Image (spheres, rainbow, N blue to C red):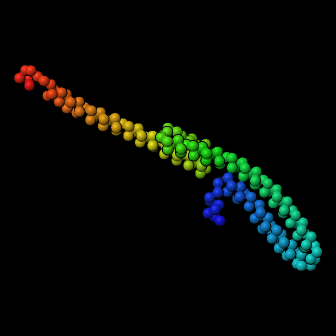
């Protein structure tokens, strides 16, 4: 069951958790109310116990229904908020993996786990950008350093390969 829950999208997980909370609370509330009534009346009036229990069940049922609707509304709000942030993070990682190392997520606004993840993605992109710049500088330096001796060797080879008519110069 836990594996299946982890495989579902996050907005469904949030909705499921928020919808189960009122149900669990209602079950505990009904059980607690029944025990409290039994203890208070000490089994004297069974008819009264049943009518009070029915009234508590109706009240708890209405409370559960209202809480479930409220939880579903909260889940929809959270779903939109979380999903937009995750989509933004996904787009940023795709851009960075395509070589756009200047792309930043900008996770300074959030102080939760998603904000920490955004900050880590920005740090990774900055480091990759620095490494790419260092690689380009190294390649430019190496090609420059190889060009200079090659030019000298080519110059000497050209000089040696020229057809000189003067024996002293040859």
Q: Residue 132: image x %, image y %? A: 42, 40
Picture coordinates of residue 99 (x, y %)? 47, 40
Identify the residue at image location x=87%, y=62%.
59
Is residue 7 toward the left or the right of residue 43 in the image? left
- The answer, for residue 91, to whether it is visible in the render is yes
Work out which residue is located at the far bottom of the displayed protein and give it. Answer: 43
- Looking at the image, residue 7 sits to the left or right of residue 33; the answer is left
Left-right relation of 91 to 66: left
Quarter of the C terminus within the rendering: top left
* Quarter-of-image position of residue 151: top left
Q: Is residue 110 visible?
A: no
As drawn, 31 above or below 83: below
Residue at 11% over, 22% down = 164
- Where does residue 19 sit, x and y in percent of width and height? 74, 58
Observer-nearest residue: 6 or 53?
6
Most extreme residue toward the left is 168
Quadrant assignment, res 137: top left
Question: Residue visible at 49% across and 42% down?
Answer: 98
Q: Quadrant of the N terminus?
A: bottom right
In this rendering, the count of numbered labels is: 0
Residue nearest the viewer, comparing 105 with 12: 12
| Residue furthest top as drawn | 166
x, y (%) of residue 38? Answer: 86, 75
Q: Residue at x 74, y 61 (%)?
A: 20
């Amino acid at each position: 069951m836990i594996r299946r829950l982890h495989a579902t999208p996050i907005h469904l997980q949030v909705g499921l958790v928020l919808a189960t909370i009122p149900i669990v609370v209602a079950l505990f509330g009904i059980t607690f109310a029944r025990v409290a009534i039994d203890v208070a009346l000490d089994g004297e009036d069974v008819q009264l116990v049943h009518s009070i229990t029915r009234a508590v069940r109706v009240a708890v049922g209405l409370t559960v229904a209202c809480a479930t609707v409220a939880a579903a509304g909260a889940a929809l709000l959270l779903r939109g908020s979380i999903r937009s942030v995750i989509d933004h993070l996904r787009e940023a990682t795709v851009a960075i993996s395509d070589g756009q190392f200047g792309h930043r997520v900008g996770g300074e606004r959030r102080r939760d786990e998603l904000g920490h993840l955004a900050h880590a993605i920005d740090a990774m992109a900055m480091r990759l950008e620095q490494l790419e710049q260092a690689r380009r500088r190294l390649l430019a330096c190496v090609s420059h350093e190889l060009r200079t001796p090659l030019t000298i060797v080519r110059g000497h080879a050209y000089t040696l390969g020229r057809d000189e008519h003067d024996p002293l110069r040859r």
